Image (spheres, coloured by chain):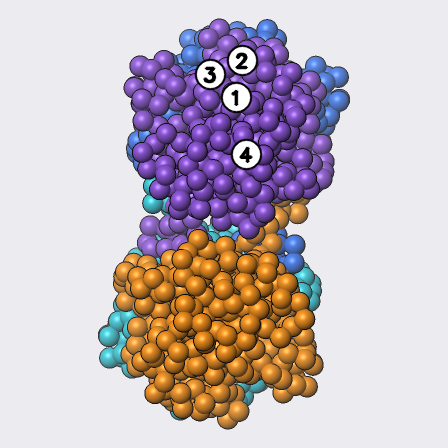
Chain colours: A purple, B cyan, C orange, D blue
């Protein structure tokens, strides 16, 4: 059993806490969170409510889950790593590229393993597709179409602190593209509109986008984003290569179909990310357990975080200037 | 060009007439039908309205399409064959097994080619499945599930002259089973109910059935029938073998899907047999043109008609007795 | 937390033990199993190795999982229930109908809740289909086609103690049919062959079957069984009603497709029951936790076990006599 | 019957000639083509071989199919229209935008109907999708993803006279986008590479592209192109709106699936455009017959040709400059 602590018991925190508590080789010793019911939450998983200092001072704590508010991720992760504790950091490590780059000396070869959790990396479909692509099943990759549409936009009050579409939302797709494409991406172009919710425009953001990426060999990637599909999570990948296509992601809740005169009605897609990515979140936690056991290296860490955030910043600049941006 | 004649311009007759008229190597010279507008129908395809005698007397007529009422099929086909004219006979050749058997000497090695049109044989999906099964793609066939449900029951007045479910409807599935299974079928068992339309029961017939066939090697075939699916033509085949399964028939009108919160709505199945089997009917006519040209032998003829009708009679006896019937 | 014990740590036992150990509201206190490594298995989940007597004597044990060999199920379940402990009994409760019927007075209204685990009842697809059928989405049910083909036959040495195809294998489908069809089944007919493995015939059993069920209202059910599909678990349901069809079960391992010249290759079906029914087994355990908490009544118990076993016995008699069997 | 003539009996010419010859209301009187076997081709459909002058001088000719080489389309179409004959012009009307614009006075309100045949407009899936989109099934359209990948690149010698990827290939997608998007497209951006065949690069062209379109309301359209899929025609549309998504085009040759241990193998996509778009070509010819009968106006003509070619030219400029191009 690995003794761990967790910062944050909000929406994502609750998911990670349950997965950690149910994991056969993890034991949550501390929960740190200011909310009134945090004590009750802590006891429900057999943990104590404590402070950042308690966690850092507990030499038996091997790992820490950082699932507190985004603006605290970088400092907490850095402090834990400095204390020799492995870190599971909910994405993003930080929304501010200069700040993230300033942390390079601490984080690029950290004192303990740093794992930044991008959920798609442990989604079974994404993972199977990536493995088969890397195994050469379609020969040489030539281009990539990523669709990533959410069921419904977040509440308008979330937008101002979200980092905006590219840093909050497309960041997953930038991570996917970086993972799936073999060479560094050298150029970014995007167009975006606010078509879904005027409150998003009022907050200075966009909700509908098409973004193009290009790598040094001329491979092309298209990312399709919308904050609102109206039909659940639509997150699909199509990889085109010299020997065919790999595609995945047409995931629905079950296989039941209702056939009536109008045709066949299939089960809906998932409507909330907790059920859509339930298996991915369990996979993330199991990966962290393996990192703690020393049987795995973190699959994603500082370098991936920087890469994705650079792409997001380039997209923001492209949107602002109307021109492609070279990296 | 092959000069042909056609008997009957009813529902099926109209389909065959249009396909014959549009076929690049067929020329319809005569139409024989008593209905008032038969002359107009004949001219619309460049044919003359005539009598059975006209057709038999026209030495240039190479082939005849028999699409008149079912009770006339056998006599007309026999007369045309005796006159040396190839016959395209809409199924069934006859509904009465003793009568059909009595015609054996004329029809088993007829004076001219006799083609009995079972539409499934030229349905592209059935045909592809049969070819791949015969090519050994699933090794040795072990069992077969055939689903054959129509969109809606026929008008009640049709039932009394239809021959009943097994001779009118399941006959297609008996033909399929005989075509797909390599050895002779030796035993038949069936259960049936009238669940769809009480008028069918009032006419002494059933509308919902499950029929089992068994061949000499112990291979099993199940046939699922309903006169009313409520969602269009549901006619599917699943063939299970030592090396896997071949299945086909999940045919819908187009590939368009509508995704909304309740899930994905696919296009409906076909609602009338003319559009469902449009390609099969064209294939039948093209097959007849090849038979006339001497480049093909009839794919189905007297022997297949007898085989299917024997199975239908066995099923009727099984239904009546509640016991399996050996052939 | 509910304190429980488990009998048996074999193949199914291991699945249930892991699910119990990982369940947030269950605590496995005792494991009873004669195998040499049972002590190690027990400690891995924080349990003690003990005897049947230890379990019965431990007043704090609220529930017992009976996952020992089939021939011990009935006696162990009966003893535990008599001791006031709720029972989770892996199916079947017993393979012998007279023995099961003899236990009626103890089990039909047991002293503590008795849950007999039929995995399909907690399979998400079966469950969704059943709920929608019961909710009337296709109107009145008219007929049912159940396909249940396993990836590969069991080792030949398993056959003699298995109870034979109908009691070991089709029993799941009998349970499904009983669950899905609203009225009691009144008649059974079956044909079966040994086409997959001659060793199965040598052991006096069959491996390929088609079974028909009929209820008092004339509704028909067809069950398609094979011990070997060659392509994984193929377990599907089609329910036909007055208002359409509900179908489910076309489950594959993921959504990734590989498109090449020969067509699209979809991911395979599941090859072992542990992964195929992983979610069902977790659902079963969660159901048991709810039964222990008093928030749920066992979904399946003595009556369902008797019903399915009666159908299996009727099918065995039909196979032996070649005739339909009335219940 | 409408008496028509045809210019050109090449690859596309052969398709149109057969469809015209088999059409019940069209009669091909003249074929004009310099190839040695043109006489034989003409007689095979009952037509005479003649010259442009013969056609123009035959007052009974109501319509002309222009399927000769691309560089002759505009002149022949103009001459026929001036002679009062309706024109079915295989796409494109012309590859040169200035030349096309110079013909505006003759063609924008021509003396006889001018129909320019873009095959997607009569593809049943595209047509169904467009109709349902226009009917508001997904509310207000917000964005569009079009995939258009061919099975294999054309022979290298075709590239120099093709007009290049955007005018020869993407032109179909520009036409689709113009048809599906309700407002005029105001801006174009594209990236492209030569990844499939170096001979294409040697000829100064590209084979892999991603193109973005934007309309005045901020709606976005992405077009994915490749000259070689490796798995047949992959031409799909996804339309995202305020009320869901409409998608279509996942068309394969039949519904047969082969299930083996590796998963389910579905039938392949179509490998040649003649079979892929067989129904579309028949639909085009039937549309022309309706135009001749005066029961339909040409669905696409001069204005659509100009619109698509403008988009193609904008894409060419974007590719050359690396910047978006405003229309």
* Residue C49 seen in the figure: yes
Nearer to the camera, D246 or C119: C119
Would you say D229 lies left or right of B315 here?
Answer: right
Mark 3–mark 2 CB contact (< 8 Å): no
Q: Chain of mark 4?
A: A
Seen at 49% across and 31% down, the residue is: A54
Q: Secondary structure at mark 2?
A: helix
Is C263 above or below relative to C325?
A: above
Q: Earlier in the sequence, mark 4 or mark 2?
A: 4
Task: Compare residues A280 and D270 and report the one nearer the observer.
Answer: A280
Number of numbered discs on residues: 4
Q: Which dot marks residue A58? A: 4
Q: CA distance from mark 3 to mark 2?
A: 27 Å
| Rendered residue at 42%/48% (across/down) | A253
Q: Chain of mark 2?
A: A
User: Do dots 3 and 2 share one subunit?
Assistant: yes
For marks 1 and 3 on the same chain, the one whose residue lies earlier in the sequence: 1
Q: Which residue is mark 3?
A: A191
Query: Measured from the top left, where is residue A189 in percent x and y?
Result: 54, 15
**Pointer 1 or 4: first along the chain:** 4
| Residue A99: mark in rendering | 2
Rendered location of residue D281, percent (x, y): 51, 37
- The answer to whether marks 1 and 3 sit on the same chain is yes
* Residue B265 place in picture, x, y as percent: 38, 46
**Where's the C terminus of chain D, which quadrant?**
top left
For residue C225, say whether it is visible: no
| Marked residue chain, label 1 | A
Observer-side mark, 1 or 4, equals 4
| Residue hosting label 1 | A74
Q: Secondary structure at mark 1?
A: helix
At a point 49% along the width and 41% down the height, the residue shown is A29
């Amino acid at each position: 059993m690995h003794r761990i602590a967790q910062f944050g018991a909000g929406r994502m925190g609750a998911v990670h806490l349950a997965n950690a508590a149910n994991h056969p080789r993890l034991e949550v010793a501390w929960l740190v969170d200011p909310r009134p019911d945090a004590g009750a939450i802590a006891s429900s998983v057999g943990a104590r409510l404590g402070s950042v200092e308690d966690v850092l001072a507990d030499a038996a704590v091997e790992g820490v889950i950082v699932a507190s508010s985004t603006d605290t991720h970088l400092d907490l992760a850095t402090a834990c790593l400095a204390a020799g504790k492995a870190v599971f950091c909910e994405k993003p490590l930080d929304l501010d590229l200069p700040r993230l780059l300033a942390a390079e000396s601490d984080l690029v070869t950290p004192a303990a393993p740093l794992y930044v959790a991008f959920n798609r990396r442990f989604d079974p479909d994404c993972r199977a597709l990536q493995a088969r692509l890397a195994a050469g099943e379609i020969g040489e990759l030539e281009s990539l179409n990523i669709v990533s549409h959410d069921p419904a936009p977040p509440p308008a009050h979330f937008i101002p602190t979200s980092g905006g579409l590219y840093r909050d939302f497309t960041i997953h797709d930038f991570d996917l593209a970086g993972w799936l494409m073999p060479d560094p991406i050298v150029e970014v172009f995007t167009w975006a509109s606010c078509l879904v919710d005027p409150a998003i425009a009022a907050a200075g953001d966009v909700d509908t986008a098409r973004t193009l990426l290009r790598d040094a060999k001329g491979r092309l990637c298209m990312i399709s984003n919308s904050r609102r599909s109206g039909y659940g999570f639509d997150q699909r990948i199509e990889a085109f290569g010299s020997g065919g296509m790999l595609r995945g992601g047409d995931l629905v809740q079950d296989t039941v179909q209702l056939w009536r005169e109008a045709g066949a009605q299939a089960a809906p897609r998932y409507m909330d990310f907790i059920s859509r990515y339930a298996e991915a979140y369990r996979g993330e936690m199991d990966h962290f357990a393996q990192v703690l056991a020393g049987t795995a290296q973190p699959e994603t860490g500082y370098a991936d975080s920087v890469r994705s955030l650079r792409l997001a910043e380039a997209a923001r600049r492209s949107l602002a200037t109307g021109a492609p941006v070279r990296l």
